[in-house]
Image (tube, helix red, strand yellow):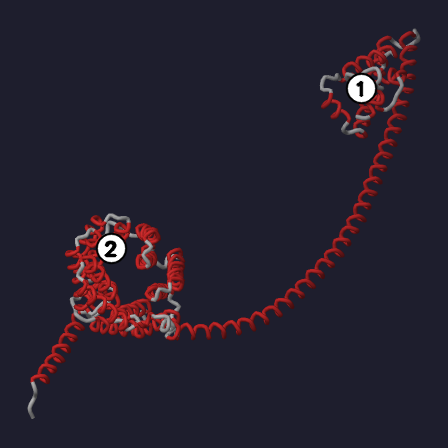
Amino acid sequence: MRISPRQIAFSLIVFFTLSLTAQVESYLDVKSYEDFQHWSNQVNSMQTESADSTIYLYQLAYDHFLEQKDTLNAVNSLVEIAINYGHLVQYQSAYDNLWKALLLADLAQNDAAKVVVYLQLGRYYSFYKRKEKAFEYFDRALNLSKSLVSQGILESFYLVDCYYAFCSTYRELDNPEQAKIYLDSCYQFTDNNVNGAPIYYQKFELAYIISSEGNHRAALDTLLAIAPWFDANNPRFNVFIFTYIGDNYLKLEEYSVGEQFYQKALTTSRKFNSHLDFTPIIHKKLADLYITRGEILKALNNVKKESELDAQFFDSRSPINRSLLEIKDEFRVEKEKQKQLLQEQRLKELENEERVAFLKTMLLLITIAALIFAGVLYFDYIRKKHKVEKALIRKKKELEVAQTNELLELKNRELATSSLKLIEKDEILATLKDRLSQGSGDIKANELKKIVRTISHSNAQNWEEFEARFLSVNKDFYGKINTKFPKLTRGDQKVCALIKLNLSSKEMAKLMGISIESVHTSRYRLRKKLNLTKEVSLTEFIATL
């Protein structure tokens, strides 16, 4: 059997392809890296001439993370697969992987993973020039990211991806004003001290904004400065870098240099089989350049090339085929069905909850009404009980006061009677004393003096007995007098006590053993010490004490 050179060549290609794939797979095993981002950066920086190898590696990564139940990185792998299918203009495969990623994130209830998918879906809608739908997904991603950041689930720098999606989309829509606003938002959450990937992508967007302001030389300096980084870390992106460099040289009327960079952009696209959908735009720019230079044949060739590529790549973006997004939206359809089913179930639950809530409310109202009625009855019972008790206490107090007053009045009458008897006794003794003092009978002088002293002593003793009995009836009397009028003498207090018993001046004089004039003098002095005016009765004032 003869083997043709063509068969040998084909076998060698297959062999070397399989060997290269095996080497790449061994060299870029995701399990050998500390995290997905480091591994992804290494994959994107590979100098491979096909996106197929990259897709293959991300597929292995997806299988690994799915086995590890790492939803976020499994979703990240599917998104990268979708991006690479997009570079190959295989939009159907790209959408399949995005909806698969969204379904996985939804089932795992992983909001951080949803953010990644929303951003990429928004980017694809923007490719279709469906701005409203694109920004709807960007808004979802941004709002969800803000929520996760506020909850402490994500760090604030994750917001950069959301703002960058807005910025790059406005660049593609040629709206530098809005692009600048979202680029400023990117700066707020980007650490400028770290020489990371976001800074270089943001500088690329900045170059576009600078160029739109007419400063093409500054834009060129920025693009040429960042090109080596992309060459080392993401060479596929140089399709855009070289194209925008060519644009600025064209604006500066340096057509030859601009042409060179347009050609470098096309070469990069062919080399990496990447960003193929962007090549028709580059051919259009070349056609415009050649028209400017008067090279009509070259311009026609590029117009023809643009038309061929547009027919090849962009038919899926035509109005007829824009429904591809909805046709492939299996996830959305399934979610709508689930949502409708959940809504119906929820409606039934709400109806049942409303019935239960109504019954609970009625029961609660009845219970409250019963408690209020019982409370009113109990309050009325307590009020009446307290009223009766207060009436009894009041009557008891009135009775006690009346009894006390009666007893006090009785004792005072007894005391007054006793006082009068003492007065009568003292009068008899005084008469006897006078007669004995004047007599000249057989009684000896010494015995007579002894009898007189005994009578005088008996008067003093009678007063002490009177005062003791007075205090037993009027316990607080002297206390009140001493408190209000501490300067009163012992004699003043005796006068007050006798006035308290409502004795006349004559009776007081006899009881105290002094003249009536002395009693009047004592009463006058007492009024002055008590600071009483002429209008105030001394007897009535003393009675209140």
Q: Where's residue 46, x and y in %?
A: 17, 66
Neighbour tally class for label 2: few under 14, some 14-19, many 20 plus, Cα within 10 Å: many
- Label 2 to label 1: alpha-carbon separation: 117 Å
> Which of 377/419 is in front?
377
- Which mark is nearer the camera, 2 or 1? 2
Q: Quadrant of residue 130?
A: bottom left
Judged left or right of residue 446, residue 72 is left
Amino acid residing under circle 1:
Lys
Residue drawn at point x = 83 percent, y = 36 percent: 404
Q: Is residue 110 above or below residue 492?
A: below
Residue under label 1, please give it: 494
Q: Quadrant of residue 523?
A: top right
Secondary structure under tag 1 reads: helix
Q: Is residue 305 above or below residue 397?
A: below
Query: Mark 2 or mark 1, which has the lower sequence index?
Result: 2
Residue under label 2, please give it: 204
